[in-house]
Amino acid sequence: MKIIVKILSALFLLLVVIVVFMFAFDICPPQGPWISPPWCASSSFKRPTYDMKIETSHLSQVKAVNMFDTWGRNYNFNMLENTRNDIESSFSRVAEMGAQEVYVHDFQRAVYNDSKDNFASLNYQIEDEVFLNDMRDESMTEEDLEKLVKAAHDKGLKLGIKQNMAFVDIGKYISKGLTGEIDSSVKEDYNKFNSSHSEEWVRDYFSKWEKRMLLRAELYNKHGVDIISLTPGWMGPTFQGQEALANELNKQLITNVRKAFDGQIQVELSFYGILDGVDGKEDWTKYDYYKSADIKEVRVYNLPTDKYKVSDKADMAQIQVGIDELLKDLDSWSGQQGIKLSIFFSPFSYPNAINNGIVEYMDVMNSQIKLTEKDWDHQAIAWQAFFNEITKYQNIERITANNFWWDDAMDPDVKVKISISPSFRNKPAEEVIKQWFIK
């Protein structure tokens, strides 16, 4: 009996070791009658279907999909999921939707050599993001790039890579636990970081950012990436008081990256910079560097100001009026600048989101987020209203649908409140976008 117990114990220990090894190195067994490990892509999910008859017309714009801006493990806060396991399945779905381009996000971070709260310091480097910093995002490896490019190109998609840059360390708040105050704490630090940048800081930053982008551009080029964004998204710097200098340094950045990268160069423009000429305290009328880029994109999450806003319970016709006014102004500005604009449209899926815009759906312990209900029909209506109007405008050359979740997960099965996010995967909006994209 003791021998049998020892044998069974040894077998159990061996099984544990094998499972831990597979988890650590993202090893998945082949599909079969057995249960797939939770960190592997699963084919058991029954995708919802929506019997929708949508009136559509042909879109002349380039059609693109932006993947949820994360890379690596734990994007559902379950510690098991990994974007690397969902490249093929997600890109297949994007191609099936009729998209021509797919965008993913690489990650960079500022590593300070002195106090992390001394945002005026020049004593920092821009380095790879690592998983242990915030228990989620990390920079892409060469192996990642090879898989992403192959999966996209095999499905007839161009691959674009955007940049997420963290000057503020979100990891220090996550390490304290999800208290519901992450969003406000990070915003406080970010506002402090961007409160003032000296000429010396701006020149130093561009020197470091250009060096980083040249390294990434060479790597992307090596593996056949089609589009690179040079805008440090998420927590990038603003340049109030130093706009003229930043404009020239951005032009230099674009020129130098073209020497290292054969594909298209993308930059992102400020939504309020276009509409108001100013974003916060940053004077966008002093910028024209974006004209040097191939793709000029603006993010639209909602209808801002009373000029565009609609009533809280607006129907599609009313929402369409507000969206049309906004698109008219964006198209007019593009014509005045002599450029073509790309629209990154990202309506959330909760009531009245078309007016209110972004909510931090990942701050799952926040009481307001807990109380926010999903409204998938509202999101679908916003998309249909957008498409109904976008066909009018000749200065808008690309539609980027944001964002597409990396797997089929949905709360409450996972901690992240995907149901109220702008992700349209497995929601009626996915069918709306598909019918317009494949027209």
Image (tube, rainbow, N blue to C red):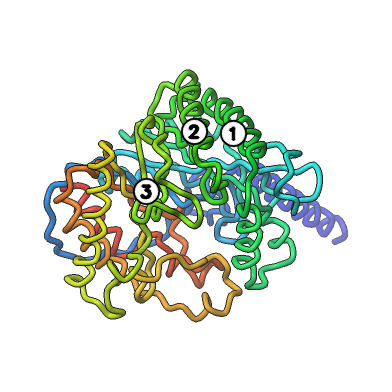
Q: Which residue is mark 1?
A: 206
The alpha-carbon separation of the residues under discs 1 and 3 comes to 22 Å
- Element class at badge 3: strand
Image side of residue 222 versus residue 23, left or right: left
Give left or right: position of 201 versus 238: right
Residue 364 placement: quadrant: bottom right
Q: Given the image, on which type of amino acid does mark 2 rest?
A: Asn
Q: Is any part of residue 191 visible from this angle?
A: yes
Image vertical order of residue 406 relative to residue 384, above or below: above
Q: CA distance from mark 3 to mark 2?
A: 17 Å
Q: Nearer the viewer, residue 286 or 124?
A: 286
Instruction: Assess disc 2: are there few (<14), some (14-19) or many (≥20) residues with their C-alpha within 10 Å of its C-alpha.
Output: many
The tag earlier along the polypeptide, 3 or 2, is: 2
Q: Which residue is mark 2?
A: 250
Q: Amino acid at mark 3?
A: Val
Is there a contact, CB below 8 Å, between mark 1 and mark 3?
A: no
- Residue 407: x percent and y percent? 45, 55
Image point (27%, 48%), residue name: 97
Q: Are marks 2 and 1 in contact (CB under 8 Å)?
A: yes
Query: At which x and y percent is residue 213?
Result: 55, 30
Q: Is residue 361 above or below residue 197?
A: below
Q: Which residue is mark 3?
A: 298
Label 1: few (<14), some (14–19) or many (≥20) C-alpha neighbours in 10 Å: some
Element under label 2? helix
The disc, 2 or 1, on the residue closer to the chain's N-terminal end is 1
